[in-house]
Image (cartoon, coloured by chain):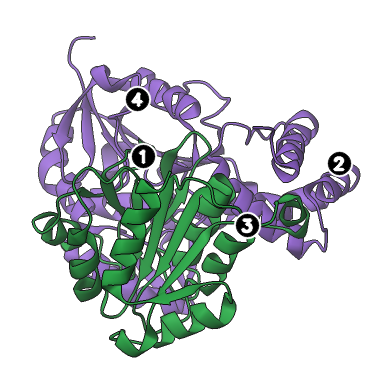
Chain colours: A green, B purple
Amino acid sequence: MNALSRERQPAPVAVPPEAVVIGASAGAVEALSVLLPALPGDFPLPVLTVVHLPSDRKSLLASVLKSKCQMDVREVEDKEPMESGTVYFAPPDYHLLVEADLRLSLSSEAPVLFSRPSIDVLFESAADIFGPALIGVILTGANCDGSRGLRAVTDAGGVALVQRPDQAQAKTMPQAALEACHTARSLSIPEIAVFLQEAVTRK
Amino acid sequence: MADKTDDIELRLLLEAIFRKYHYDFRGYSMASVKRRLTQARDHFGCSTFSQLQDRVLHDSSVLPELLSYLTVQVSELFRDPDYFRAIREQVVPHLRTYPSLKVWVAGCSAGEELYSMAILFREEGLEEKTLFYGTDINPDALKRAEAGVYPLERIPLFTENHRKSGGKSSLSDYYTAAYGAAVFDKSLRQRAVFSDHSLVSDAVFAEVQLISCRNVLIYFDLGIQDRAVGLFSDSLVRKGFLGLGAKESLRFSRHSESFVEFSRDEKIYQKRGTV
């Protein structure tokens, strides 16, 4: 997002959220195993998730979490239309981006901060489309991917949530996100789940 | 909601590139085009897409570099080994039944996929009767594909992929290492034609038995995807094969009825016998 479009954004306002983006790395499976099952099956937003995984293209993540979640959980196929009540995972070795027609697209372009999929790529693209109607969540991880992306979310007027570093299995990613994004709220995972549910009932 | 200023500028930039140079990126997936052109904009020291448009319209030396941002070139030899294993074990038996074969690697970039296919066909004894077409819109990538020279540090990954794909020989049989690079055997491209061809604007040029086009359609929006898949359908013989990338599918395509799933896991489709 460039300076020009940032100037055009109004000051952060409370708007009904339209999507949630989540980024996680080391310790992701445990963290997501608490967060995602806490969301009801009729959670009215799409939840887009990037987890750093080995680039081998088969991942069991979606199928493992699907059995624990009330929401539908799946790995993205290119140009899939986003649906509410669904958790989408970026497939290993592909970046995940959001298109203006609210379809999901994939990309094999170079890794960002050694990661493909990259949390920054998803968050920046979602921030560009949803503006203030986006909630960005950074969870446990041992690198700094996601910091720029979370900053893009708040610059566009969206809401930023970060797992409390002292409770994260790997603190580096939440710490870096909090440093990059001063308006981010630092919460426990159960608090994040409550926040997400209240955000959709507040409208 | 009104378009954001940078989105207006982005559309105008793509329109300018099309009108002046006939490269048509207007039907590409905008999210990643925007990302890549933002990188290009920063690279050229421009603060807006309009400034970049001014540069590309008035300085023709800018275009080649811009093309390298607009066309994504990431591939490996035998990328996704399971795909090549499926071609080898499931598709090759069908291909054996033809007296002569044509294979089209669409969006061949720097040639990795085409060399993979040529090696596989040699190992399966099909090379002699096969003609390979490698097409791309990026002239620089086509030059590199024709040269068949890859950095030596990529060879361990290529070798491992080749082994996992069910390779019947040693990959080192196919290249010579020199000066930090691996030069692939000229004989592998004796039966290959590399050519400029756009899936967005060009037409059918041959009737082929196998098309491999992986991780190319993801850069197109649905409209251009439909055009490209229609082109594939028109190019394939009845019961010909189309291989896509691991996360690509014909599920959202207007032409999905023209194909049946041949290998669901490996995204290999077969054109219907009766259309």
Between label 2 and label 1, give the one nearer the viewer.
1
* Chain containing mark 2: B
Between label 3 and label 4, give the one nearer the viewer.
3
Instruction: Determine the CA span between mark 2 and mark 3.
Output: 38 Å
Mark 2–mark 3 contact, CB under 8 Å?
Answer: no
Q: Is residue B244 visible?
A: yes
User: Which callout, 3 or 1, points at the residue further toward the start of the chain?
Assistant: 3
* Chain containing mark 4: B
Residue marked by disc 2: B57
Number of other residues with Cα within 10 Å of mark 3, as a class: few under 14, some 14 to 19, many 20 or more:
some
- SS category of the residue bearing label 1: loop
Instruction: Determine the CA span between mark 3 and mark 1.
Output: 25 Å
Residue marked by disc 3: A12
- SS category of the residue bearing label 4: loop
Residue marked by disc 4: B253
Residue that appears at 91% across and 44% down: B58
Mark 2–mark 1 contact, CB under 8 Å?
Answer: no
Q: Position of residue B233 (x, y in %)?
A: 34, 21
Instruction: Determine the CA span between mark 4 and mark 2.
Output: 35 Å
- SS category of the residue bearing label 2: helix
Instruction: Determine the CA span between mark 1 and mark 4.
Output: 17 Å
